Image: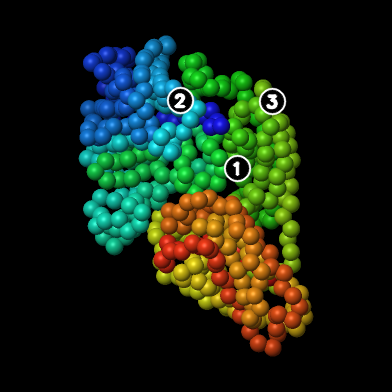
């Protein structure tokens, strides 16, 4: 069953200029509601679709006039309006989705909430503001496709003056994405996502999705869910929503809180710890406050899985039950085993950070890929962040002393795998066992700028007699998949870290 979902965001228009104030209210004209916020913004909603057809801000038209701003790809809703004090509420209703627009007196924003009981036919839940590229030309360079010479992957990655441009390159992890926007002369348009704006989205704190694409329209997005490397099933001061009668809206007074003390993570990761809470209905997360504790947002009552992350690697899991009006105090401690290693490449933290090209993968496509690495002689920046079937293997060379021989254990951490791919090693001619096919999202991965999937740890037991001290040991890391592809579009795995102990 598709869970009932309520999410909220605000599309805010901003300027350094003083707004000319007008009368607050709604004018009905033909098939349109024309809303004057008395704060410099006048926007128009079509009664029979729920589409926004105009956003006039201090005399500047922010809405593209050839296309509309809308939920999904348009929902064909029936809209009404009502004024409640200093607020105007416009519910746009279908049999499976309610989308609300709210105007606040003297506030140049369009506040929105979406309640749905079924996924839209487009297969994802999103709001797209199709803005006027002439008045709002400035957005992220990495997602600006104006002047492209054609697509180079899947009709959504384009080549512009020798650079790849991709709408996903505008994305940021949810935990760091509360505001994103575009600007022009005397005007800016921003999606402002409140603290609980992602609570019924999916993917967790490290998930990321499209924010922008700049072309003939300047597209500004709020993605609530999609199939974009999704790892799990679907699920500002906006207190004024509490009194507006929005379906499934839960006021702060009916929520509870969690206060957590987290411990056990190495000091080098102390500032990278995240605590998250999730169940089938909602998700929340927090970083440490100045007192060292982790404080949740106002949460819906219920029982949650509480997860402690070292960067993006889950190192402890427990449960907490949140009750209305109460703050639950809990402790969580890392359960990660810290083995004494012979050597290690990278950190087991759920990311490929530090490896070759990991610093560019979020905004660029593939680059030259080194495939040979000598332990102790090269920095981890020479080790590739991903291994591709069509370009593998990666060869790792390492020396050992006689005291380091015998039966040993090799671990390879993988953050994401594409097309059922798994890592397979050969050491000095000895072939390691083939692991089971991993459970990973059925979606493009590194070519859409992400490494976030389901963290997997491959453990290889190396028998005595395989490793040598008389010469350099040679290990190849291959990737195996029943699927195929060309070069960087071939099946692949993203590496977290590799260690021998």
Q: Residues within 10 Å of mark 2 (few under 14, many from 20)?
A: few
Q: Secondary structure at mark 1?
A: strand
Residue 133 seen from this side: yes
Closest to the observer, 480 or 189: 480
Determine which of the numbered discs, if any, sits on residue 323 in the image.
3
Residue 306: % across, % down = 67, 40
Q: Badge 1 is on which residue?
A: 287
Looking at the rendered image, the disc whose residue lies closer to the viewer, 3 or 1, is 3
Mark found first going from the N terminus, 3 or 2: 2
Residue at the (67%, 35%) spot, across then down: 304
Q: Are marks 2 and 1 in contact (CB under 8 Å)?
A: no
Give the distance between the C-alpha atoms of the residues marked 3 and 2, in whole angstroms.
29 Å
Give the quarter of the image for residue 122: top left
Q: Name the image quarter holding residue 82.
A: top left
What is the CA distance from the residue labelled 3 to the residue labelled 1? Answer: 22 Å
Task: Estimate how packed mark 3 is, as few (under 14), some (14 to 19) or many (20 or more) residues with alpha carbons within 10 Å.
Answer: some
Q: Is residue 336 left or right of residue 202?
A: right
Label 2 belongs to which residue? 96
Residue drawn at 27 percent across, 27 percent down: 53
Residue 447 x, y percent position in the rendering: 43, 57
Query: Marks 2 and 1, Cα distance to the nearest angstrom?
Result: 35 Å
Give the residue furthest to the bottom: 470
Image: 251 above or below 153: above
First in sequence: mark 3 or mark 1?
1
């Amino acid at each position: 069953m598709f869970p009932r979902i309520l999410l909220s965001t605000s599309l805010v228009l901003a300027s350094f200029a003083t707004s000319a104030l007008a009368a607050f209210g709604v004018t009905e004209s033909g098939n349109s509601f024309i809303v004057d916020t008395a704060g410099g913004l006048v926007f128009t909603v079509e009664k029979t679709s729920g589409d926004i057809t105009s956003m006039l801000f201090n005399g500047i038209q922010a809405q593209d006039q050839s296309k509309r701003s809308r939920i999904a790809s348009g929902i064909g809703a029936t809209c009404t309006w009502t004024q409640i004090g200093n607020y105007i509420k416009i519910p746009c209703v279908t049999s499976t989705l309610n989308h609300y627009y709210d105007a606040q007196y003297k506030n140049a924003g369009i506040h929105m909430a979406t309640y749905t009981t079924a996924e839209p036919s487009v297969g994802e839940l999103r709001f797209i503001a199709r803005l006027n590229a002439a008045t709002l030309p400035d957005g992220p360079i990495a997602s600006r496709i104006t002047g492209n010479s054609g697509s180079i992957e899947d009709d959504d990655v384009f080549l512009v003056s020798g650079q790849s441009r991709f709408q996903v390159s505008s994305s940021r992890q949810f935990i760091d994405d509360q505001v994103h926007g575009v600007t022009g002369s005397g005007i800016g348009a921003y999606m402002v996502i409140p603290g609980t704006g992602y609570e019924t989205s999916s993917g967790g704190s490290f998930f990321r999705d499209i924010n922008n694409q700049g072309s003939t329209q300047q597209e500004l997005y709020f993605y609530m869910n999609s199939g974009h490397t999704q790892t799990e099933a679907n699920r500002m001061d906006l207190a004024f929503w509490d009194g507006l009668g929005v379906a499934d809206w839960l006021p702060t007074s009916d929520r509870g809180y969690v206060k957590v003390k987290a411990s056990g993570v190495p000091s080098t990761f102390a500032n990278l710890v995240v605590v998250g809470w999730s169940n089938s209905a909602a998700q929340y997360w927090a970083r440490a406050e100045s007192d060292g504790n982790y404080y949740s947002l106002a949460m819906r009552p219920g029982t949650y899985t509480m997860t402690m992350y070292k960067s993006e690697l889950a190192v402890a899991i427990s449960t907490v039950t949140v009750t209305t009006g109460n703050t639950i105090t809990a402790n969580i401690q890392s359960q990660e085993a810290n083995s004494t290693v012979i050597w290690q490449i990278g950190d087991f933290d759920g990311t490929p950070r530090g490896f070759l090209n990991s610093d560019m993968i979020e905004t660029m496509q593939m680059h030259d890929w080194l495939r040979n690495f000598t332990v102790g002689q090269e920095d981890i920046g020479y080790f590739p962040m991903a291994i591709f079937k069509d370009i593998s293997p990666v060869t790792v060379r390492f020396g050992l002393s006689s005291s380091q021989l015998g039966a040993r254990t090799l671990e390879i951490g993988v953050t994401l795998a594409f097309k059922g791919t798994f890592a397979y090693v050969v050491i000095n001619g000895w072939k390691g066992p083939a692991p089971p096919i991993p459970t990973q999202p059925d979606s493009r991965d590194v070519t859409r700028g992400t490494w976030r999937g389901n963290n997997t740890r491959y453990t290889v037991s190396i028998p005595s007699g395989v490793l040598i001290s008389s010469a350099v040991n040679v290990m190849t890391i291959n990737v195996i998949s029943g699927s195929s592809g060309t070069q960087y579009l071939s099946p692949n795995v993203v590496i977290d870290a590799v260690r021998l102990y």
